Amino acid sequence: MIKAKPKPLEEIIDNVKDFNKLLIAGCDGCVTVCEAGGLKEVKILAAALRLYFTQAGKQVQVDEASLTRQCEKEYLAQLSDRMDGYDAAVSLACGVGAQYLAEMYNHKIVFPGVDTCFMGVNEERGLYSERCQACGRCILAETGGICPIARCSKRMLNGPCGGSDKGKCEINPDIPCAWELIYERLKTLGQLDRFERPVEPKDWSTSRDGGPRKIVREDLRI
Amino acid sequence: MQLQKKLASGEFVILAEMEPPKGTDVVAMVANAANVKRTVDAFVIPEMSNAVMKMSSLGGALLLQSKGLETVLQCCCRDRNRLALQGDLLAAQALGVPNVMAVSGEEITHGDHHKARAVNDLDLMELLAAIQTLQKGRDLAGVDLQGAPSFLVGSTVKIPTSDAARLDEVAELDKKIATGVKFFITPPVYETAALEKFTSLLKGRPVSIIPTVLLLKSVGMARYINRLLEPKIPEDFINRIQKASDRVRECVQIAAEIITTLKNRGFNGVNISTIGWEDKLPAILAAAGLEFGG
């Protein structure tokens, strides 16, 4: 899932302090799971903003909403009868949702309320780590199900680099060496021969390097 | 320093693009440059133009500088991060390159290494600001340099065709001037009207506008440009090439005529782009009536 973290309150206040009618719009999808932008966080942020405006002696309407997903028009449409009543919205969805909200209501100012970080897993509550960079051409079959692009600090495709220490990355000792993980996993699977095959320079054209991407699935389109 | 001096004194400058080879054989490159060294004020060394892998601009520039020829290094956002860009700029200046031109670079997908990753760590404005920071004696991390570079800095400018686009481009150009840019090279020019309409808005600005003169190589090339690019090549030029008994000679003649027109119209200079036909430079310069000697 997409992982995000709440933006500092000061940054959000700086963005919205001159407006009088605000909507705080959460998303019940990924950002709810990582507790950055769901209904609970909407209520916390709205309460904090109300407190700020009260202390500042300013009367500001701060309303709350959370949509099933902000990355789908059908759910964004649920705000259609309300948006005209606001000067601006703070979206607690990921960057995808925040953009789609702004796209759908393009006459309204939309501020991001979270910093979208990566696609990753919930290791524990409050501990999320990256697993995929959406490069557009998955190589997990070759690497024991562990992605060196997302998990090796140097994105090496023919690792390891030789700098790891006791299984930890030389760049950040809190991160496991992806290539050590790959080696151990391939050993467990009896596939160490894959480890020994050199990999050609990757085709990055399917990644962001090829420009903004779009999937067209003719089989699904009506 | 010839380029800087001539631009400062208002003399007509002649730049010529000199493509480095795709390979290590630099004999032709050096010979083509040496052939016109008395006429050309500085050689612009493209940094893998059209995203086609070649010898780097830094390599080509150092090579020609080592032969006593003045060059304009192109530094390009596409292939290098801020460390590499700064490091190359320091190397270029330390080894004698006096001029630099910042470009953003064509998309990787337009070139011959479609699978490569583009870097674009700095955008064009950030790169220009980085050059200025280096010239003030610091790097982008704020650390003092042991010797600061002092380049004559150039960049690119578009030739807008609508009033709104012209104003946008003037605003863009002003931002670049604020970062220390002294000369601007335009896309290929075939007729001066649109360019003059634009340059009339630039009066009072302390910069030189140097139009590019592209050597057309064939009718096919001209048609291709007119299909995909702006500005368009006048049909008259295409017809002349088509009807000519010696088409190469006609292409050279057309380039020379454009140079002459630009000179007569009071432009600061020209940048002659021959993309692979650098051996035609002597003929172009001679046909344009510019002083020439090997």
Image (cartoon, grey):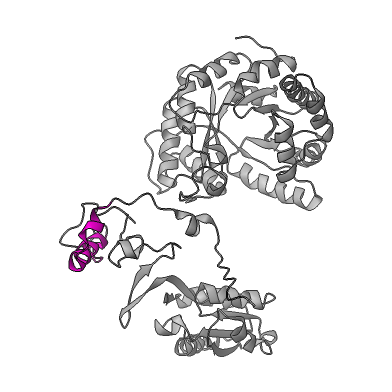
Residue A72 lies, with reference to residue B250, above or below; the image says below
Q: Quadrant of residue B24?
A: top left
Horizontal relation, residue B203 to residue B208: left or right: right
Q: Is residue A44 visible?
A: yes
Is A178 included in the stretch rendered in magenta? yes
Residue A54 lies, with reference to residue B104, above or below; the image says below
Q: In which quarter of the image is residue A141?
A: bottom left
Q: Which of the two residues, B82 or B213, is positioned nearer the viewer here?
A: B213
Horizontal relation, residue B15 to residue B84: left or right: right
What percent of the width, then of the height, locates residue A175?
A: 26, 65
Horizontal relation, residue A70 to residue B85: left or right: right
Q: Can residue A151 be seen in this view?
A: no
What percent of the width, then of the height, locates residue A65?
A: 56, 89
State the predominant SS element of the stretch in magenta: helix
Q: Which of the two residues, B221 or A122, is positioned nearer the viewer here?
A: B221
Is A61 included in the stretch rendered in magenta? no
Magenta range: A172-197
Residue A116 lies, with reference to residue B173, above or below; the image says below
Residue found farthest to the left: A166
User: Quarter holding the N terminus of chain B?
Assistant: top right
What percent of the width, then of the height, locates residue B286?
A: 71, 14
Residue found farthest to the front: A219
Q: Which of the two residues, A31 or B89, is positioned nearer the viewer here?
A: A31
Look at 55% across and 67% down and name the residue there: A215
Horizontal relation, residue B291 to residue B86: left or right: right
Q: Which of the two residues, B184 or B81, is positioned nearer the viewer here?
A: B81
What percent of the width, then of the height, locates residue B17?
A: 60, 28
User: Quarter holding the C terminus of chain B?
Assistant: top right
Look at 65% across and 19% down and name the residue there: B280
Q: In which quarter of the image is residue A71?
A: bottom right
Look at 23% across and 53% down and name the residue there: A196
